[in-house]
Amino acid sequence: MRSMGALGYDDQGAISRTNSATVNQSPTATSRPNQKAKRLCTKPGCNAYALTNRSRCAAHPPHREYDSKRPEYRALYTTIGWSDMKRNQLRSHPLCAEHGRKGRVVAGSQVDHIIPHKGDLALFFDPSNLQTLCASCHSRKTAREDGGFGHAARIATNSEN
């Protein structure tokens, strides 16, 4: 009687009989054809396996320098109160205020705080502190105030509005 060998998967994922001595027992071998092989953590010098559907292991979470520099008051932008104020502002003032000051007519798409609130709830939810801007004007103003695009951060004054 001949030996049947062990069942396994070949390179294409098909079931095949293999000699039990040749079965691949490496950590990258998959037990099912649709399962991804384990990958090493992408952190330089780390030899641990990455978490499922992630690029890094548990000891090396993804690098989120951008998020760590963002202020805690960013959560205010996810509230229903802000969502309602934003919708009302865009309905009542659909044009970019900055372009309007220059005599141009451009559709606005973003709601901006004229005076940066920096977490002050009264200033954040004050409708008179809002203006509609197009995306390019809003990016320019935010970069100027928050120090984006290599510029130093500065505080806006009422004369700049």
Image (cartoon, rainbow, N blue to C red):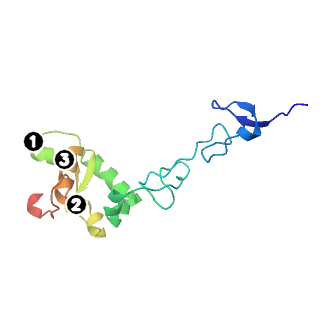
| Quadrant of the image occupied by residue 3 | top right
Q: Position of residue 91 (x, y in %)?
A: 30, 47
Which one is nearer the viewer's eye here, 45 or 79?
A: 45
- The amino acid on which the numbered mark 3 sits, given as a three-letter code, is Cys
Q: Position of residue 59 (x, y in %)?
A: 49, 62
Which mark, by number, is residue 70?
none
Q: Check disc 1: other Cα within 10 Å, few if <14, some if 14-19, many if 20+.
A: few
Q: Which residue is mark 2?
A: 128
Q: Nearer the viewer, mark 3 or mark 1?
A: 3
Q: Quadrant of the rendered structure where residue 151 is?
A: bottom left
Q: Are marks 2 and 1 in contact (CB under 8 Å)?
A: no
Packing grade of label 3 (10 A; few <14, some 14-19, many >=20) is: some
Q: Which mark is residue 137?
A: 3
Q: Circle 3 sits in a helix, a strand or a loop, which is it? A: helix
Q: Earlier in the sequence, mark 2 or mark 1?
A: 1
Q: Quadrant of the N terminus?
A: top right
Furthest residue in direction right, as rendered: 1
Report if the CB atoms under discs 3 and 1 are less than 8 Å apart.
no
| Count of all numbered marks drawn on residues in the image | 3
Q: Position of residue 56 (x, y in %)?
A: 48, 53
Seen from the viewer's position, the closer of residues 100 and 24 is 24
* Residue hosting label 1: 103
The residue at the point 58 percent across, 43 percent down is 37
Give the Cα separation between the discs numbered 3 and 1: 14 Å
SS state under label 1:
loop
Gap in angstroms between the C-alphas marked 2 and 3: 19 Å
